[in-house]
Image (cartoon, helix red, strand yellow):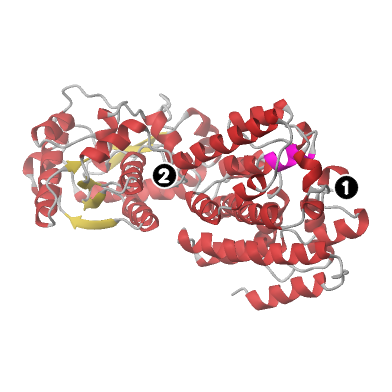
Amino acid sequence: MISYEKYKSLFHNYANRYDKSDGRVELKIIHTEAVVSIMDKICRMRHLPEHTSALAFLCAQFHDIGRFEQLKQFDTFLDHISVNHAVLSCRVLEENKILDELPENDKKKILTAIANHNKLEIDPTVYSAIDSAQDPQPLQDARECLELCKLIRDADKCDIFRVFAVEDMNDVVGAPEEVIAAETITPAVLDAIREHRSVDKVIRKTYLDYWISFLGYFFDMNYPESMEIAREQGYYRMPFERTSFTDPETKAQVTEALMILESYMDHFSGIKAVPKALLEFFKRHSSLALAFSGGTDSAYLLYAATACGCDVHAYYVSTPFQPAFELSDARRLADSLKAEMTVLPFNVLENETVKKNPKDRCYYCKNEIFRYILEAAASDGYTEIIDGTNASDDAGDRPGMRALRELKILSPLRECGITKKALRDYSRDAGLFTWNKPAYACLATRIPCGIEIQSEVLQNVEWAESRLSSMGFEDFRVRVFPDPAENNGAYAARLQVTEHQLPLLMERRTEILPLLKERFGSVLLDLDARASSL
């Protein structure tokens, strides 16, 4: 358990070493306290785990601790004419052993987040650490580290807007407002705003460029919650509205920059990443039940519906065809959106046709599941049902599609022309953790058509895929069939992985083989590599 009061005291004890008669010292103390408060609000709004929230607090408390030494040595807060204050903050923390009581992994994550909080972009190595993680704990650490980087960047920016609006510009950028009022905006800086990019400090030429670059921070916001906080504050407009710019062209450029920003915010805040066609759909259909699986498609659809103010209720039908993690993901997503979700347990194998597993099994299965949802939704007052079929899905006479048509299920993503790639992009912009979730067809697809589906076989497939996931595999399949080498009804497993995971599979072959042979007679490798679903 991290003691917040202890670390607050450590910060203030350190800050007290510096001359508080200099208003700039107090400015950074106030800024730190504000970032801590904003960080707490973002973490609560996003329902983050306690451990992540605690580390996020430490990132906020110490992200600018190097500012005091920067000011003492260089008499400025401008990094480009002094020193990178984020790097200096990390050095101060190390030299003063402030984080040394933390586990080494946690300390490393905090230092990485602080080192990245003022960069133009998060260092690519933070992302690559996720891709290269082989085991569950390193993967969890890498993901938490990226989350901390995003959180501190957002929380810091939210309060920078306040500093920018209310503090003396001499303290903030090193020039009075009357000097800035007579300057112009460098074309490259205005281009960055027009292109919705953060402004690289190397292209800034004037103090006004520095002002405008604050607006560019909005384009680097990671979470809708952060944008909501910044917009509610309203600080971003204040400096520009109180300044009388002397050059008519500059006035026009400032007006343009603010219009671009607010148009972006309109798109981002509340209805971020929802295309116009989908907005119009939800205007026409304002009360809906959603067939919810927790996958990328239905997760985005739940986000879009709630963002558009639709009265939407998610129904998750729990069958033997779904692994436990899908329900866990569905609950996590619904909780993060504060959306209503009902879990409907349903043993679809009680349908003899589904159990016999014919080629059109999907038709009978979807018929059963969607009729069950329709019944539950009707009792809750919903008459229209939507699902996550997208424009990349084959709309031909596939058995599942035929069932949807017969039951008059609406598919707004397909209707609005939203492809799988587009909705992944929208999901990422919306901050949904499902944005890069691999496609996961139901467990029944692991069994060849015509072979009767048995609950025990499905459980063995789920067990095997869970074990391989814990080894770092993703977007793969464990397909099964009756083992011709066994006479006791055993099944063989055929592993199908993407090409880039073949080296990992060969590296861990001696672990995988005995593990899977606990449940399967033979374990085979499909040399026809699986095409990535991402």
Q: Is residue 483 visible?
A: no
Disc 2 marks a residue whose amino acid type is Thr
- Secondary structure mostly seen in magenta is helix
Disc 1 marks a residue whose amino acid type is Ser
Along the viewing direction, whichever of 22 and 67 lies nearer the viewer: 22
Q: Is residue 108 above or below residue 84?
A: below
**Which quadrant is the N terminus positioned in?**
bottom right
Along the viewing direction, whichever of 106 and 411 lies nearer the viewer: 411
Is residue 403 shown left or right of residue 455? left
Of the numbered discs in the image, which one, if any, rests on residue 82? 1
Residue 82 coordinates in the image, percent (x, y) = 88, 47
Residues rendered magenta in the picture: 207-212
Distance of label 1 from label 2 (alpha carbons): 41 Å
Q: Which residue is mark 2?
A: 434
Residue 444 coordinates in the image, percent (x, y) = 23, 40
Along the viewing direction, whichever of 209 and 322 lies nearer the viewer: 209
